Image: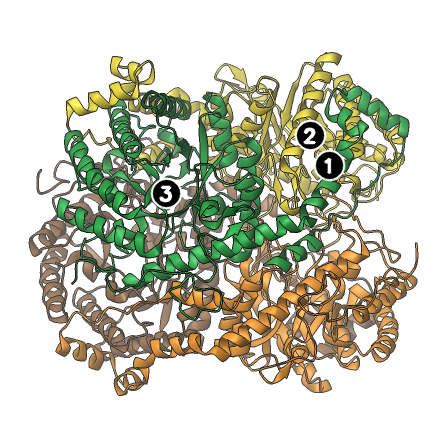
Chain colours: A orange, B brown, C green, D yellow
Amino acid sequence: MTDRIFADIAPIRYEGPESENLLSYRWYDADRQVMGKSMKDHLRLAVCYWHSFAWGGHDIFGAGTFVRPWQPGQAVTQELADNKLDNAFDFFERLGVPYFCFHDVDAMATAETPSEHQRHLRAIEEKMARKMEDSGVGLLWGTANLFSHPRYAAGGATSPDPEIFAWAAFQVREMLETTQRLKGENYVLWGGREGYDTLLNTDMKQELDQLGRFLNMVVEHKHKIGFKGLILIEPKPHEPSKHQYDRDTGTVYGFLERYGLTEEVKVNIEANHATLAGNTFEHEIATASALGIFGLIDINRGDPQNGWDTDQFPNSVAELTLALIEVLRAGGFTSGGFNFDSKVRRQSVDAEDLFHDHVGGIDVLARALLNAASIIEDGRLDAFVKDRYAGWESDFGRAALGERTLVELADWALEQDNSASRPPSGRQEHLENLINRFV
Amino acid sequence: MTDRIFADIAPIRYEGPESENLLSYRWYDADRQVMGKSMKDHLRLAVCYWHSFAWGGHDIFGAGTFVRPWQPGQAVTQELADNKLDNAFDFFERLGVPYFCFHDVDAMATAETPSEHQRHLRAIEEKMARKMEDSGVGLLWGTANLFSHPRYAAGGATSPDPEIFAWAAFQVREMLETTQRLKGENYVLWGGREGYDTLLNTDMKQELDQLGRFLNMVVEHKHKIGFKGLILIEPKPHEPSKHQYDRDTGTVYGFLERYGLTEEVKVNIEANHATLAGNTFEHEIATASALGIFGLIDINRGDPQNGWDTDQFPNSVAELTLALIEVLRAGGFTSGGFNFDSKVRRQSVDAEDLFHDHVGGIDVLARALLNAASIIEDGRLDAFVKDRYAGWESDFGRAALGERTLVELADWALEQDNSASRPPSGRQEHLENLINRFV
Amino acid sequence: MTDRIFADIAPIRYEGPESENLLSYRWYDADRQVMGKSMKDHLRLAVCYWHSFAWGGHDIFGAGTFVRPWQPGQAVTQELADNKLDNAFDFFERLGVPYFCFHDVDAMATAETPSEHQRHLRAIEEKMARKMEDSGVGLLWGTANLFSHPRYAAGGATSPDPEIFAWAAFQVREMLETTQRLKGENYVLWGGREGYDTLLNTDMKQELDQLGRFLNMVVEHKHKIGFKGLILIEPKPHEPSKHQYDRDTGTVYGFLERYGLTEEVKVNIEANHATLAGNTFEHEIATASALGIFGLIDINRGDPQNGWDTDQFPNSVAELTLALIEVLRAGGFTSGGFNFDSKVRRQSVDAEDLFHDHVGGIDVLARALLNAASIIEDGRLDAFVKDRYAGWESDFGRAALGERTLVELADWALEQDNSASRPPSGRQEHLENLINRFV
Amino acid sequence: MTDRIFADIAPIRYEGPESENLLSYRWYDADRQVMGKSMKDHLRLAVCYWHSFAWGGHDIFGAGTFVRPWQPGQAVTQELADNKLDNAFDFFERLGVPYFCFHDVDAMATAETPSEHQRHLRAIEEKMARKMEDSGVGLLWGTANLFSHPRYAAGGATSPDPEIFAWAAFQVREMLETTQRLKGENYVLWGGREGYDTLLNTDMKQELDQLGRFLNMVVEHKHKIGFKGLILIEPKPHEPSKHQYDRDTGTVYGFLERYGLTEEVKVNIEANHATLAGNTFEHEIATASALGIFGLIDINRGDPQNGWDTDQFPNSVAELTLALIEVLRAGGFTSGGFNFDSKVRRQSVDAEDLFHDHVGGIDVLARALLNAASIIEDGRLDAFVKDRYAGWESDFGRAALGERTLVELADWALEQDNSASRPPSGRQEHLENLINRFV
């Protein structure tokens, strides 16, 4: 096998909607201006290292299916880590995305002790820095994996054992500083085992306090070292844990409020995590925006018939149009972006399939962006909403939401003494049809 | 048909586990002492008016099946309301529960205007007060129905129309004061339509602000009139709305923090709402307790195969034992209690079925209480948990959760330079077997 | 209120994709030829009477919201039934669909006894026949409502009471003959309560035998009276029942095999029922086609976050494209068609909203049909599948699926003695991208 | 580490309900007679090899956590396979169960080619035979793993490649004959990848025909070699596949009918698969019994909040009581039994935890058996059901289900001309309370 598996694949170019080349962009035209900003700057696309380079195609019922020179899914030597890095950057460059993301252990040689961990992480960091400089590909965010090693079986920050808490602190310190040195733009924590398998052996209040303290320490360290990016939590309701404390955006907001972190920590919303939690993807974005904690997006899709995190690439332009409307309404990303937390199916064994995955996903996002921008520029949707709540702009409405007491409002209703206007049509079907005009 | 349908049914008595009388209590012995308090004072049982007296057995695919003299499910005259009241108290007394709960419209004659609403509510309040005095049955909580009338189709407090917001304020003012005059011990708000059917026509931030202001007005009024009970929100994720803002305890906590209400407002946790939201019932209680907002319980069960609120009576002693452990750990109820928000199945058409429903549910709660008390008195479960987190009581643990910085902890791990202890067995199966010894 | 609520709404016309008129068809051009057949003949569109004319906007938590002259949701006099009929045909004609569908009780005046039922059904049948003749609108299928009246609380054909079984037979006989006289093209049975609320009071084998016998009786009567249309079962997993015997197409197929009915009875597949059962809509069509029992479609959509039958109008062109591919592969409809078993949301209170609902849904179907036809004409998708299974066309493949024994195949593998080829890439992402080119 | 990890654990004995020894049976008393048969013969308990000996505690987000001398989760040498076998039989004997179950690859050394596979399987078979003879532990069923190796990524019997179909035939032939030589009592097929990941690349009819032919070959071979046990399919709706053809008992029944196999093939019902498919466990048993295809049970439980196969040990006596009622009603097992297809949680890392898992599960089954027998002997439940359907025993009822035509029944209803009796109370709550008396 060749050492560089993408060598024969030509860089992906924008060729326009009529192109018959399935390995071209039909919609993603990086420099095209949309609402005053380039597509590239709107979407801030990133490839994730874990699904495409550290996963070997295994699932819970079967072994890995991907034959790669860097042997994904096995213990990693420095040599394999180097090969993986070369291939990863070959991929990023051919795909033409501005960013990637990684966990410490995705990229580095396997380590068992802290000193080895530090050594291996710095070894790959150094090579990665050169690759980044050569390629121009940046780091959208870094993260530490606090869930794969058996030491984290009962959680990292929420471990019953303070020594493991310290190990987690070590790993995050190292990776936060690596992220900073690599000019990474954000730092994310996903707490896959920050939850419980059974309440019977769990002290929930203790664990929440641990998680609150841990996050505060991370924020303090960020300021100490002058890291300018966002710190983010990625909500997920469960899997592998039975229950994860960061179950969705509303819950994370309460947690951040409790531990004084709403100004410091934002959410990295994943589409598939949103639906596993019983919310729509766009709901999570709208909620984060309403609560002032919108940060990043992990883009993928789940399977509505399967109750686990399938992490498929997004393929519904219609659904993403709704999500992009919320992103644009939220003012777009500051340091955030769209990270493809999606993986090819286990049967998609060819190097080429990694391109189909990402090219398809990027084009879907690009179309959704164009649609969302058209809808916002069209203005009818926003006008409908504004008009629906217009009563709150009246003197009565402003007072009702302002200084009026329950008694004053109740007495007003009693004085009017009518049966109250019924709400006018909510026009849901009309609005859905309006959206469909642009999709 | 007789006007008093429970006339022939003898009061339900405690007869002990060996009784063959299915209309007796085998476990609920009101005055039995459990951990220093009577069963009655632990459970503080209530019957809800709506399912047993205001619902006629209709479902979304079919008409009512219950033949009752007060014609449930139809517009209510004063005469029918009076008959319903008589029958309801016949039921409460025969069942021997200390409390009931009701929405304004459950009990009163139908009204269309505020003045009529006030008149009809006060008319039934007056008769109810006499019934309560005669029977000794108290009001656990009152609530206003802000979801059944078409005026609330787009929400009450979250209506796009401030006039409907005022109507909601009127209804809550009236019912809060009625609750106070009836010596009700708490006041609950369930926001069935405080959410949205589609994000497309919704301004979420505006609606959250409305809901926050509304709740603050209610709290202000409570203090003004000197109402001493709790104000509570009842979380539910959806139904009839597509999405309800108060989706679960974690989300409600964030909402209360945002609007400065965590000291003033608690949660009324419903078992079936918990499972619809993707949580266990005991999780919701444990969460509310950890966050300091535990108040009340609406007890029932859902159907794990059906995705709507089936509101069946609880029948799993094992599941409720887990819930009662959390209630006891939380210190039990102050002014809260267990309200049977459960209804007989549509085919259970006889008056007698209402007794089977409640007698079974009460006995299940009583057994669960006895089991939970035994488990806590046994001490092994709590001891296991305490031991599991014992490291946090060490100097290192206290410092780690206290003043230590990320750097200090990371450096400590690096100095130790071992691969970190793996967590000892979580012993889930052992603990589950331990619980089963008591169930 | 005017008696004819659609009087001011102009007939819906095809105006092409660029039309800004939201009450026009942008894609549905009835006579446009697609793969050798008109759109009208491909889709065979029908409006259902129940959601648009017999439902008043109530849900399980609230009263009806629609103000209509025929007072939907209340007991129906002949006069109201006549007004409803007039309005329904006004709607069908303005919408320009070739068909409608109805349950007996949707259209007729309320009846309590068989003779009254027969009289009222025939009264409306007579008027309906004239309306149909005048308008040219045909009946796609008829059906009897065996679930709304309290007599059917425990099922119709599966009732524990043979007298109710006889009532069900009466109602079906009447409606099957009415359907025939109205030149209805098919007859459907949906068994909303043909299942159970609890296994504890249920004899499943007895009930299955009843259902099998009932269906055989219907088939015998169909032949006796010379009805030429299909007889169909509409699968649904539950709601209002806890469990319905006809849960999905695979299960219905087994039932039909058991009672000797696979040649006589087909399935009417509903999109929202498919997803409630844990299947995709296209899976159900493909299954029915593979098993030879594909008949009809009830088109709508569910809400992935809500666990009940929301019956929303379809609005995803991408999802319906997949469904239409399966319909075209199955050879299209014979006497079947697409019935809009969808309803406006409860807040969509205006007469106009009924048009937005249907116009949007029809255009989505039309676009999906165009897309599916393009994909099939393009040929790449089908060619990929054909190639993937090409091994089965070889001598070895044909023998393997034909006369070869387990021993012969096992010995062949042993003789080859290699580790067997791994499957080539399944190319899922590539194929999904290919589909997205056409959507 | 010692080579024999269970050496220090004493055999599990029956010590009665009052025993404080958590590693004793409190309810499972093998020779106790229940309804004329010993508990041992009722339950026919088996331990599965895969979860307890071939799985190393990995999940999709993390590495194995179990430290065992046979290195589960890694490639297996003959030496490791031998150690695993020794330990497995140490476990079976200490636990005191009469049976075990295994897949070929669970027990044998890893093989890549057919000849190696045959050699390794026979090597372990030979040693296993001696172990079985020495211990008296029998094989409840054998099975071939057609899903873990990458060659089966697209299915075994349903592979698009006939060579893989032949490989599957080889593996099944070998394992069926091994099962026969080991005096195994049944042979099971679970088709984890006999389904699809996407319909887009799938020819469903072709795959169903392959699966039908494959199963027929297995049945032919069974008869040829004189294997007397049952052949069984284990239904599951999905995971790892998006959709599995054998989704539940109703669907499998249809499949068996289609390919002429209802007399030859039965179902192995798994509790967790039942609930993943949207059915209750007891529903699946009752369905299999009603359709005449009940065979075996894989006992475990799922997590109602988690959408994947958690395979936890059963711990609800109440739920299993309902299942055991159905098993007893079905006449109990012939060659079937209860196989513990359950695994300890990933944090339950000690050898001792394997005992807690199984001892708890066995006692729960034993209690459920005692409860179910008491309920059946009590007779009230069955009497209620019999009485509920009594009308079908009348002349009218027998004729209605027999020779009566639709016309005769309809005319009878018309002659009676009343509104039909409404069904009497279904008494669901009463029956649930009755069950709770015995739980």
Q: Amino acid at mark 1?
A: Ser
At mark 1, the secondary structure is loop
- Distance in Å between CA atoms under marks 3 and 2: 51 Å
Which chain does the numbered disc 1 sit on? D
- Distance in Å between CA atoms under marks 3 and 1: 51 Å
Residue B332 or residue C27, whichever sits in front: C27
Q: Residue at x 70, y 16 (%)?
A: D220
Q: Residue at x 62, y 60 (%)?
A: A315
**Position of residue B3 in the picture relative to residue A249 (left or right):** left
Q: Residue at x 32, y 74 (%)?
A: B160
Which chain does the numbered disc 3 sit on? B
Give the number of the mark in front: 3 or 1. 1
At mark 2, the secondary structure is helix
User: What mark, if any, has residue D210 been given in the picture?
Assistant: 2
Task: Identify the residue under disc 1.
Answer: D159
Q: Amino acid at mark 2?
A: Gln
Classed neighbour count for the residue bearing mark 3: other residues with Cα under 10 Å, few (<14), some (14–19), many (≥20): many
Using the rendered image of the protein, determine whether residue D311 is visible from the camera's viewpoint.
no
Task: Identify the residue under disc 3.
Answer: B364
